[in-house]
Image (cartoon, rainbow, N blue to C red):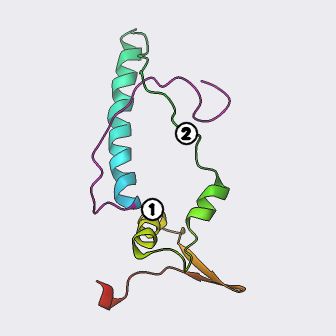
Amino acid sequence: MLEKVDTGNIIAVKYFPIFPTDDVESLLLRTYDFQLVLFYEIVGKILNGENLPLSSENWDRKPFSRKEFNELIKITSEMDKNEIERRIRATNYQQFKPTIQIDDYIFEFKGLSEDAK
């Protein structure tokens, strides 16, 4: 394990499907399920005295910073509908909400209107 987050060797990876209807909440729940399965697999190896595996996977990018996430939640009038929908889907979860700023006012996404559903 290294001091810096997401920089050490990757010992194992579990892939799972991402569906068009997924949002942050459904992905988190599925992630937790697969993390638990992987945890039991790795702990089983440790308890059996086996060496930890070493995945051929590498870190492709550095982790998102809070500053980058704060930029991702911003919606602007220049964005097309597809980009706005992608950002809402990627960032709308619990206390995190996409926002639009007009002058000194910040508006927060609350959900789709009845007409849009």
Q: Which disc, if any, is residue 44? A: none
Total numbered labels: 2
Return the residue at label 1.
90
Q: What range is drawn magenta here? A: 1-23
> Looking at the image, which is closer to me, 80 or 58?
80
Image point (42%, 80%), residue name: 111
Q: Residues within 10 Å of mark 2 (few under 14, many from 20)?
A: few
Q: Residues within 10 Å of mark 1 (few under 14, many from 20)?
A: some
Image point (27%, 55%), residue name: 19
**Reading the chain from its start, which is encountered first: label 1 or label 2?**
2
The answer to whether 88 is drawn above or below residue 101 in the figure is: above
- SS under mark 2: loop
Residue 36's quadrant in the figure?
top left
The x and y percentages for residue 50 are 39, 9
Return the residue at label 2.
61
The answer to whether 53 is drawn above or below residue 75 in the figure is: above
Is residue 68 at all visible to an observer of this figure? yes
Q: Main secondary structure of the magenta part?
A: loop
Label 1 – label 2 distance at C-alpha: 18 Å
The label nearer to you, 1 versus 2, is 2
The answer to whether 22 is drawn above or below residue 52 in the figure is: below
The x and y percentages for residue 117 are 28, 83
